[in-house]
Image: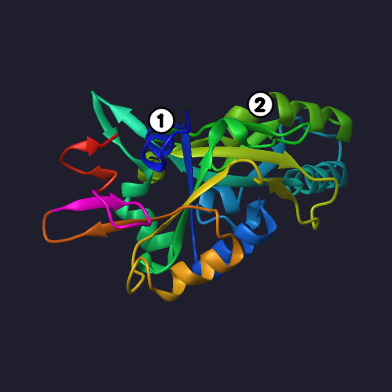
């Protein structure tokens, strides 16, 4: 028996990507998510990640050259960040209900939240994905021991959890699940195939869910993609499907199936 929209949304393992409405439309049309380059990250530690050579060389020139190829190697790495649901002490923090994410990444609520089925992401060979860990103290640097480019490449990959998946606790609200990829060239634009994983769009501040311009624009791109509405009042938050009905979810009661 075919599952309803309510059932599909409630039961799937969800990942969320908050973005502007224009970017959301491009992602929906292309079914691809672009990887972000490290120098453009919002986290200062990540955008200024320092990798240096721990071994002391015989000359300053040798040390300088090895520092340069360490920097070049790091610039090859790109990443995509998703929010996800998180459970803490039997309380679930749904990723679509993160107000900071709507404000910072989705144009103060006028953008969109794209919802993906985690198990259907098409990771390319060599991609690596896992949860981000949040710590009280994270150094902005990583010291490697290899003198060769090949050795450095292997060492960074062996220590990828420490280098790419640790952030300070101030970022904990993002509830991040991250995918990293090493590009062939640092200037390449890399994309993740989300054609099977893209499952829902959530809008927050369209003027009317069923008649608003954002809703109609999305339906003109992909009429089969379900559009949900995240709505709120003085003391309530609800998630509605794209036809008049009872809400799928409320903050007080959780999911209705």
Find numbered disc 2 in the image and state the secondary structure of the residue it sits on. Answer: loop
Q: Which residue shows up at 53% across the image and 43% down it?
A: 116
The one nearer the camera, 89 or 240, is 240
Q: Quadrant of residue 11?
A: top left
**Is 119 located above or below residue 226 in the figure?**
above
Residue 249 is situated, as x and y percent measured from the top left of the image, at: 26, 43
Circle 2 residues within 10 Å: few <14, some 14–19, many ≥20: few
* Residue 11: mark in rendering: 1
Task: Please tell me whether residue 242 belongs to the stretch shown in magenta.
Answer: yes
Circle number at residue 220: none
Q: In the image, residue 212 lies at what x, y percent?
A: 39, 73
Q: Where 44 sits versus 8, above or below?
A: below
Disc on the earlier residue, 1 or 2: 1
Give the x, y percent position of residue 167: 47, 39
Label 1–label 2 contact, CB within 8 A: no
Please give the residue where the numbered disc 2 appears in the rendered image.
Answer: 159
Q: Residue furthest front?
A: 1
Few, some or many C-alpha atoms within 10 Å of disc 1 (few <14, some 14-19, many ≥20)? few
Give the quarter of the figure containing the C terminus.
top left
Q: CA distance from mark 1 to mark 2?
A: 34 Å
Foreground tag (1 vs 2)? 1
- Which element is circle 1 on? helix
Q: What residue is rendered at 29% in x and 44% in y?
A: 248
Is residue 104 visible in the rendered image? The answer is yes
Type of secondary structure dominating the magenta stretch: loop
Task: Give the magenta range.
Answer: 236-246
Left or right: 138, with 143 as reference point: left
Give 163 or 80, whichever is nearer the viewer: 80
Residue 15 left/right relative to 187: left
């Amino acid at each position: 028996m075919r599952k309803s929209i309510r059932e599909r949304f409630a039961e799937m393992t969800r990942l969320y990507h908050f973005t502007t409405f224009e970017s959301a439309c491009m992602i929906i049309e292309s079914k691809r998510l672009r990887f972000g380059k490290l120098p453009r990250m919002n986290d200062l530690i990540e955008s200024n990640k320092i990798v240096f050579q721990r071994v002391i060389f015989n000359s300053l020139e040798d040390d300088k050259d090895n520092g340069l190829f360490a920097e070049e190697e790091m610039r090859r790495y790109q990443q995509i960040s998703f929010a996800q649901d998180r459970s803490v002490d039997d309380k679930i923090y749904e990723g679509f209900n993160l107000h900071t994410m709507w404000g910072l990444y989705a144009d103060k609520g006028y953008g969109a939240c794209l919802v993906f089925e985690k198990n259907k992401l098409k990771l390319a060979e060599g991609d690596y994905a896992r949860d981000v860990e949040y710590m009280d103290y994270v150094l902005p640097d990583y010291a490697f021991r290899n003198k060769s480019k090949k050795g450095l490449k292997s060492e960074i990959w062996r220590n990828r959890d420490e280098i790419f998946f640790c952030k300070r606790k101030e970022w904990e609200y993002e509830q991040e699940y991250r995918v990293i990829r090493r590009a062939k060239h640092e200037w390449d634009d890399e994309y993740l195939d989300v054609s099977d994983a893209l499952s829902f769009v959530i809008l927050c501040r369209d003027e009317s869910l069923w008649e608003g311009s954002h809703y109609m624009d999305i339906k003109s791109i992909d009429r089969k993609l379900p559009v949900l509405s995240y709505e709120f009042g003085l003391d309530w938050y609800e998630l509605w499907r794209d036809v008049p009905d009872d809400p799928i979810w409320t903050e007080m009661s959780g999911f209705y199936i």
